[in-house]
Amino acid sequence: MFAILAAAASAASRQTAAPPIAIEPALIASTVNALGAVITREYIDPDVASALDARLKQALADGRYNAATTADALAGMLTRDLYEGSHDKHLAVGVIRETPPAPGESTESRDRARARAVRRTNAGVRKIEILPGNVGYFELTNFFRPEEARDALAAAMHTLSRADALIFDMRRNGGGSPGTITFLASYLFDTPQLPLFDIVHRPPEPVDHYATESTVPPERDARRPVFVLTSKNTFSGGEGLPFLLQARHRAEVIGEVTAGAANPGQPYPVNARFTVTVPNGRIVSAVGGGNWEGAGVTPDVKTTAAEAFDVAYARALRLLIEREPAGAWRDTLERALRTLPAVARGM
């Protein structure tokens, strides 16, 4: 299963709570050489990969990494150099902290840890709510694999199936599986197998095609208004959903320009102490052929991440008010709108 991974700009920076791991010059040299070999072999653009390998080796020869006395420090330096040479936010070096498991326990241990993460985050489904005015709200922080997330997403969309408008909150979404993105998008279109995007891998790997489900979900609704909230921290696959919906004029994106990390990849071991996430594919949208790499997703309505919810909610209510004839329900919608800040009502 190929996943859009939520690697941060610096994998090492996420691990500062753990005790530092001291490193020696010999490990620095072997790590740089092994890292360059992995990138040369796996990175989506062979020319960029060769340039990155040369950049790392030159920095090593110049003694730039000699100041790194811990694994975290070296990972941070390497990640910064890789970003400066590629501007690819998925390309990140991380530190392996775990004690190597006994033979035969590795896969089982990883599977248990992942299952716990899925359960404890409810497969990324953090909050669903029916707001006053019958507007559905759905906060999703990750796109886990389809087999892990399908039931939780289906349950959430079933709960929201009677809402007159939907707000998807992607402000803290760090990405995940492209198959899960297409599964969720299938609730918003009537057409089965509607092409959404391709992932073009480094040759000779074949292209992966992604489309809406062949059997559309029974709760699908291609007509009700949809709004997607974004922030500068919306990352990778979290950017994919608003990008794809915006391209098909299926949703209004509200908030901040997103991180701009489109190239999908996966982690590779460098040695016993380091790992690196390497993008080995390129997103090609079925509409226009582009993606959000480097540029991010530009909202239809720009506002701060903190104000994005109120703005989207107000716009949803105003749209529903316009469609509703005079009467008790329209009065209910107008009362809900009046509870929101004036700045949101004016956007």
Image: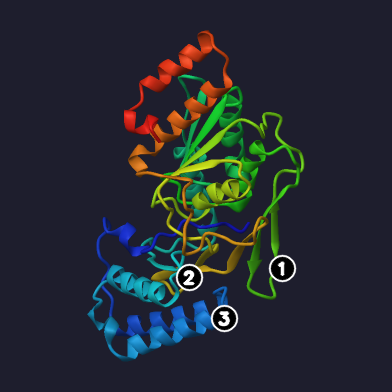
Q: Is residue 130 left or right of residue 213?
A: left
Q: Secondary structure at mark 2?
A: strand
**Looking at the rendering, in which quadrant would you find the N terminus?**
bottom right
Q: Is residue 5 above or below residue 345?
A: below
Please name the residue shown 40% across and 36% down the image.
Answer: 347
Residue receiving disc 1: 206
Q: Give the residue at mark 2.
A: 269
In percent of the image, x 46 and y 59: which residue is there?
Answer: 260
Please give the label number shown on residue 70.
none
As helix, strand or loop, the secondary structure at mark 3 comes to helix
Label 1 element class = loop
Q: The disc labelled 1 sits on which kind of residue? A: Pro
Mark pair 1, 2: CA separation? 23 Å
Q: Closer to the observer: label 3 or label 2? A: 3
Q: From the image, tell me which residue sits under label 3.
A: 46
Question: Is residue 144 visible from the viewing direction of this image?
Answer: no
Q: CA distance from mark 3 to mark 2?
A: 19 Å
Foreground residue among 309 and 148: 309
Q: Amino acid at mark 3?
A: Pro
The first of marks 3 and 1 along the sequence is: 3
- Quarter of the image for residue 18 reads bottom left
Dividing the picture into quarters, in which one does residue 287 lie?
A: bottom right
Q: Between 134 and 235, which is closer to the camera in this rendering?
A: 134
**Which mark is first along the chain, 2 or 1?**
1
